[in-house]
Image (tube, rainbow, N blue to C red):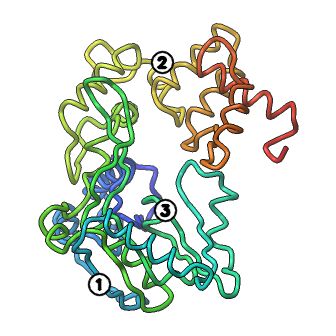
């Protein structure tokens, strides 16, 4: 079939081990296109990839191992309970008192404002020690100068979708062995380092999964179903097929008007929804706003709902102040109108810097 790809094209997918919903769909579409485009070259790159599995998926594609600039990292496993470790550290800090060098403790997580996230890259003052407390946001594609020690608690936050309730949530779950190795690698980017895993070597080998569950098996597939239907794709190859319950839930949700009565092809509404890079429910909300003359307001709400970062920041050392400030934005009508009010107030005060 005719494709929009130009001749002699090369498609490169980096950090393939992250197995996001978009990369898994891309793999399937590229595999299908490659059957009709023998000149197409696909380059899949990763530091911790299950190479044999990907090679098999792409019809026994050759594997190239390219050594990178990595320093050795010594791995240490704890043999005591974490609570005992915390008590020991606290006792040591109390005993050291003023003898201990200045600790520069910097957090980084998805909901933290971007200017505060950027502080982890600032140079460490002379005589001080930088401590970066991070979620798995810092697991890959991140190099912080001077980091030579990593403490890995062995957990991560994963997005999980329940087909029964139709809701997504972030759950704390044990990380995979591949993720643990990625974390250890943070200590060996600029110099030899050490990684302290807050779990035993036995737990690493026997309790942690080899790789994380792919996002395609734990995410809302409404967008995926609508995308594939709008592209006319009836069969798509997947490294790991999505769960049937999630597919059925996506089909049922899209039959509210995005797909025809057979669920086989998109309606006019569905094709318009597929053109908008947002969740299907938000896309339908935007299109419906035309009838009610509130498109500008709905676009604002949809944009704020599409941002991963939380609108309200609640630092632990200023909880009362943050809660008081948040009450100033509350208006009757629900959370969506509150978001609209926040956006409008920012415009009144002249932007986020104010």
Please give the residue where the numbered disc 1 appears in the rendered image. 65
Q: Is residue 3 left or right of residue 276?
A: left
Q: Where's residue 336, x and y in %?
A: 60, 21
Q: Where's residue 4, x and y in %?
A: 46, 50
Q: Residue at x 59, y 68 (%)?
A: 105
Please give the residue where the numbered disc 3 appears in the rendered image. 134
Q: Residue at x 19, y 62 (%)?
A: 208
**Disc 3 crowd, CA 10 A, few/some/many (<14, 14-19, 20+):** few
| Alpha carbon separation for disc pair 1 and 2 | 47 Å
Q: Residue at x 44, y 81 (%)?
A: 149
Q: Are marks 2 and 3 in contact (CB under 8 Å)?
A: no
Residue in the foreground of this view, choosing between 307 and 239: 307
Q: Residue 60: name its quadrant.
A: bottom left
Residue in the foreground of this view, choosing between 211 and 290: 211
Q: Is residue 255 left or right of residue 35?
A: right
Q: Where's residue 224, x and y in %?
A: 36, 37
Task: Give the residue at the far front of this rendering.
Answer: 95
Could you tell me which secondary element the residue under label 3 belongs to?
A: strand
Please give the residue where the numbered disc 2 appears in the rendered image. 269
Q: Earlier in the sequence, mark 2 or mark 3?
A: 3
Residue 43 in view of the camera: no
Could you tell me which secondary element the residue under label 1 belongs to?
A: loop
| Alpha carbon separation for disc pair 1 and 3 | 30 Å
Q: Are marks 1 and 2 in contact (CB under 8 Å)?
A: no
Residue 163 in view of the camera: yes
Q: Residue at x 25, y 31 (%)?
A: 247
Task: Give the residue at the far top of this rendering.
Answer: 292
């Amino acid at each position: 079939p005719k494709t929009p790809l130009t001749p002699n094209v090369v498609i490169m997918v980096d950090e393939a081990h992250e197995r996001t919903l978009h990369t898994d769909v891309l793999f399937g579409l590229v595999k299908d296109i490659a059957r009709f485009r023998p000149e197409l070259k696909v380059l899949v790159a990763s530091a911790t990839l299950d190479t044999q599995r990907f090679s098999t998926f792409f019809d026994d594609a050759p594997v190239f191992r390219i050594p990178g600039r990595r320093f050795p990292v010594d791995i240490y496993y704890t043999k005591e309970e974490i609570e005992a470790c915390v008590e020991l550290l606290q006792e040591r800090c109390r005993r050291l008192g003023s003898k201990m060098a200045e600790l520069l403790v910097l957090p980084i997580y998805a909901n933290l404002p971007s200017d505060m996230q950027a502080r982890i890259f600032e140079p460490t003052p002379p005589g001080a020690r930088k401590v970066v407390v991070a979620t798995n946001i810092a697991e890959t594609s991140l190099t912080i100068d001077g980091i030579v020690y990593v403490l890995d608690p062995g957990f991560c936050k994963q997005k999980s979708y329940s087909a029964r309730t139709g809701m997504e949530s972030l759950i704390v779950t044990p990380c995979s062995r591949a993720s643990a190795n990625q974390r250890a690698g943070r200590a060996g980017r600029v110099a030899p380092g050490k990684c302290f895993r807050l779990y035993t070597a036995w737990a690493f080998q026997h309790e942690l999964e080899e790789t994380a569950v792919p996002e395609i098996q734990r995410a809302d597939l409404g967008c995926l179903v609508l995308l594939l239907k709008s592209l006319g794709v009836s069969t798509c190859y997947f490294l790991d097929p999505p769960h049937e319950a999630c597919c059925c839930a996506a089909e049922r949700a899209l039959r509210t008007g995005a797909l025809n009565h057979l669920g086989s092809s998109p309606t006019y509404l569905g094709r318009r929804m597929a053109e908008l890079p947002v969740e299907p429910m938000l896309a339908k909300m935007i299109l419906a706003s035309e009838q009610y003359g509130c498109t500008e307001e709905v676009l604002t709400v949809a944009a704020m709902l599409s941002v991963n970062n939380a609108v309200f920041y609640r630092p632990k050392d200023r909880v009362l102040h943050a809660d008081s400030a948040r009450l100033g934005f509350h208006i009757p009508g629900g959370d969506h109108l509150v978001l609209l009010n926040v956006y409008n107030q920012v415009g009144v005060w002249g932007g986020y810097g104010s």
